[in-house]
Amino acid sequence: MLKKPWLLYALVTTLFWGTWGALIEKPEQAGFPATLGYIVWALTMVPCALVGLALIKWKLDTDVRSIIYGLTIGLLGAGGQLALFHALVEGPAYLVFPIISLSPSVTVILSVIFLKEKATKKHWFGIAMSLTAIVLMSLQKPDESIIKSFLWFGFATLVFLSWGAQAFFMKKANMTMKAESIFFYMMLTGILLTPIAYFMTDMSQEINWGFRGPYFAAIIHTLNSIGALMLVYAIRYGKVIIVAPLTNAVAPIITVIISLLIYAVIPGPVVIAGMVIAMIAAYILAD
């Protein structure tokens, strides 16, 4: 593990993101809107960014190139998150998430073409398996959701492209700037977009301002923020064509396991198949 620091960082990301995925709906179920959850998430990135800057003795990369890269990465991530809210308003999750789940394929394609990253045949097999597993685990049974319009497809595609490109730019930026600086600009853009999330919120509805609302949301979203910081480190030390599929394939396994313990719901055969394939892919990619 010490010989592969990228793997350690990637595993921390998957553990934290998997737990985050299992708990993220709790505040909303308690009456705290997801759009306000975005604002809380953006705020939880601040202490993580400050810790990162402290580690590099506050020597933030401030040249034009670094600022452009940092803001681009931040806007792709935070902007994709806001687009996801719109996609889920216009269409059901069981249609939206399978499209978004393929975002690592964009990362792989861009990295192979522009970064000239290479992998062994075994790793390519693992990448293909991980992408298959991601789709299988993201499939959900049709619910009572009503498709208001086909705008959901446009927003879902935007998230798919944004998050796929974000990981690619993380790797490219890591070649010329500090990982901690990258995360700082991610935090900054997340904060800058909070007014949009606020105006997307129906403030006339009853909102839970108690512990199960913003405070519990802060605890949950801190897991996401720490995971995001670890992802930047993982991409810095490893090949993004391996890190991106690996983290996106393993995190849902943890989400499903924790959800099983919390809700006592047995996943369907398709999800179980996806979990098995993901575990095999993780073993191949980590080797």
Image: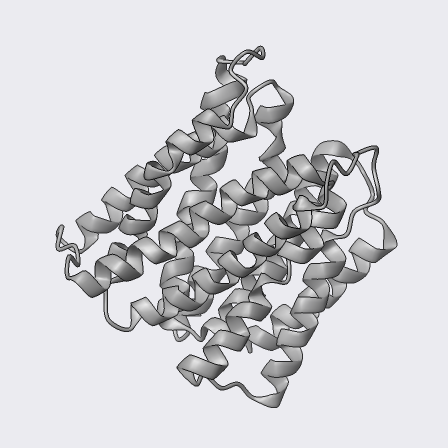
Residue 154 in sight: yes
- Judged left or right of residue 6, residue 281 is right
183 on left or right of 200: left
In the rendered image, the quadrant that contains the N terminus is bottom left
> In which quadrant will I find the C terminus?
bottom right
The residue at the point 69 percent across, 72 percent down is 129
Q: Is residue 2 visible?
A: no
- The total number of labels drawn is 0
Tell which of 189 and 181 is nearer to you.
189
Residue extending farthest to the bottom is 121
On the image, the x and y values in percent for residue 201 come to 52, 24
Is 243 rendered above or below residue 125? above
The part of the image, by quadrant, that contains residue 46 is top left
Q: Residue at x 29, y 43 (%)?
A: 188
In percent of width and height, residue 186 lies at 34, 49
* Above or below, comparing residue 79 to residue 101 in the picture: above
Residue nearer the viewer, 74 or 133: 74
Residue positioned 33% across, 37% down in the render: 191
Q: Tell me which residue sits at (22%, 62%) in the image.
A: 66
Locate residue 5 relative to residue 100 in the image: left or right: left
Residue 116 falls in image quadrant: bottom left
Q: Position of residue 94 (x, y in %)?
A: 76, 46
Please name whichever residue, 262 or 23, is drawn nearer the observer in this view of the structure: 23
Residue 171's place in the image compared with 249, above or below, is below
Can you give x and y, in whole percent of width and height, for residue 41 in the image?
A: 43, 35
Colour scheme in the image?
one colour
